[in-house]
Image: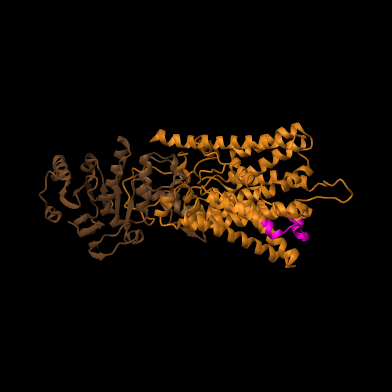
Amino acid sequence: MDNPIIELKNIRKSFGPVDVLKGVNMQVYPGKVSALVGDNGAGKSTLIKGLSGAQPYDTGDVLFEGQSVTINTPHSASALGIEVVYQDLALCENLDIVGNMFLGREEIFHGMLNQPEMEKRAISTLQSLSVRTMKSVRQKVSSLSGGQRQTVAIARAVLQRAKVVILDEPTAALGVAQTEQVLALVRRLAGSGVGVIIISHNLADVFEVADYINVLYLGTMVAQLKAGETTYNDVVGYITGAKTDHTPLEEVVS
Amino acid sequence: MTTDSEKSTNPPTNTAAGTVAPSPATATALASGHEGTVRDQIDAYLHRVRGGEMGMLPALAGVVIVAIAFFIATPFFITNTNIANLLTQTAGLMMLSMALTFVIILAEIDLSAGVTGGLGMAIFILLTNVQDLNWILSLIIALLAGAAVGTFIGFFVARVGIPSFVVTLGLFLGFQGLNLILLGNAGAYRIETPAVIAIMNKSMPVWASWAMLAVIVAVSLLTGLYDRARRVASGVAVRPMSLLWARVGVWVIGGGLVVFLLCLNRSTSVIPIRGVPIVVPIALTILWVGTMWLDRTRFGLHLYAVGGNPEATRRAGINVALVRMAAFIICSTLAVVSGLFFASQTGTVEASAGAYTVLPGVAAAVVGGVSLFGGRGRLAQAAIGALLISMITNGLGLLGLSAGITYLVQGGVLILAATVDALSRRRSGSTSLARA
């Protein structure tokens, strides 16, 4: 078993008197998909916002590739190789696929945008993800379907040489076929060695794609399970608080 | 669109940095829109138009239809005299609509652009006529004053967070007062600088007119060849050469015809008047530089990105407030240039200058296809829109119709253009929904 690429230890975060994260531990492994599930208000978003640098944790250790790191801005997360694909995708519909993939990280040649090079890298990145549903990388995002947009957003993260990609509800707005496409893309992403964190309310999707399932309940990590060794009912039990026996993932893995 | 791609592209490599490990050879070639024959390119273009990306097509069609209609209606419309008149009548409005395009792309508005032009000219005339300052230096100070106004607007919009409509409405009212105060009781000054009068009222010599066209053709050809060479060097698909020749050909034939007509004597007295009006190369240069900036630089991409989705742009690590500030600074500075054109046309600077020009400027941009919803529109579209509006004013005037009719027709064209924009937006939206 590989060492975790990200290890969270005793993470705490409170907003005024409300303790949202009460000493959370979590591990993310390279080449594996770690699902983060939990009911609304369990602290999933807060945990992710801390990792993305949008909202730093109060206390606790973040180890990235074994090193203790401080992530307090989106920029520092990005510099480490942590990219977030937001639920609302954060794409500009009026720009084409290349423009969106390179927005904020444009390639420049003699002061001008290096369009041929960006186009080439966009094409090879999408092809490395076996994307087959798009015609041209010069299509405007407004002409793409929900699944294709999700693909562009994920490819954008891959293009930034992300080591960890966090996907926030990637299938929430998608139909059945599109969901399958995106889940297949998530598997390929992990297959390339990237550590993937996926947040989802859809347990069917979670069981289909995840290697590990981490369950948050009211700010506490109540279960860290191997997807192949647990059941749908158990996970629902942990999410709703009906089951409470806590097994740390290190013991599950070893 | 997808055919022929294997022929014209080198097989994309997976060695480029930032890609994950290549998957088995299941991936089909992704196109870039540059593949295929001329026929494929035309098909792809028509596909985009049907999908709602009409660009400047409606406005260009409007220009052609209006030109033909007036050509049939009056023998005075397509004459060398009237073409020269039309170009100078368009210049001020064109510059203003191009200025406004920078902020309209952000889905903002600058209602003060017209009076900012008036303010710049008031400062200019006080410096040249009253202070006897060198006119070039005075003009630079006037342009800097425009930039300062843009900074002011940008600060209140981007940092304080007041809607641009409100900030610029305030300046629209305030600057009319400031112009009255600056220009005093006289309320108007004659421009004493021959060079400034010449911009709108004099023409270049015949040789310079043809040289201007030669420069345009050369720039068009060289940029095309340069882009092509860069794409070939990167190993991505290139469009057929014939399309580049066609583009250059349009410039040679269309531009050649206009320059030829303008180089005929259009004087009714013994002193001949011939050549392209001086304002034309000035306006074209600003149009070209602005277009390069919007199309080819990081700033341009960020401007469109903010117009499309400010939140996404912010998350991409871009300083959205700075982009907004820059757009307002460019808008107000170019507004002073439009003020210069208007003032040169009449030969006077008046306190009321610019109070009635800003809304036609917005209308021209919208008629050209610049979307008030933001994120869509090009400088050339604003310029074509201004040309269309000026053609209608000019042509109806030649037909002897009253100003009342002219305003009615202009208003109708604006609503028609806005309808085309709304329908094409719905169309591009519906295609994405249909596929989702």
* Color theme of the render: by chain
Q: Which corner quadrant holds the C terminus of chain B? A: top left
Residue nearer the viewer, A78 or B323: B323
| Vertical relation: A227 (above or below) A7 | above
Magenta highlight range: B179-197
Name which quarter of the figure residue A63 lies in. bottom left
Residue nearer the viewer, B387 or A17: A17
- For the point 77% across and 56% down, which residue is it? B198
- For the point 69% across and 66% down, which residue is it? B137
Percent position (x, y) of residue A85? 33, 49
Residue nearer the viewer, B237 or B6: B237
Percent position (x, y) of residue A205? 24, 41
Percent position (x, y) of residue A200? 26, 44
Please, which residue is most extreme toward the left here?
Answer: A245
Please, which residue is most extreme toward the front here?
Answer: B185
**Would residue B96 appear left or right of B20 to someone viewing this image?**
right
Residue A113 visible to the viewer:
no
Residue nearer the viewer, B402 or B43: B402
Q: Is residue B185 magenta?
A: yes
**Would residue B243 appear left or right of B22 to someone viewing this image?**
right
**Would residue B295 appear left or right of B74 to someone viewing this image?**
left
Percent position (x, y) of residue B267? 84, 47
Picture colour for chain B: orange
Picture colour for chain A: brown
Residue B148 visible to the viewer:
yes
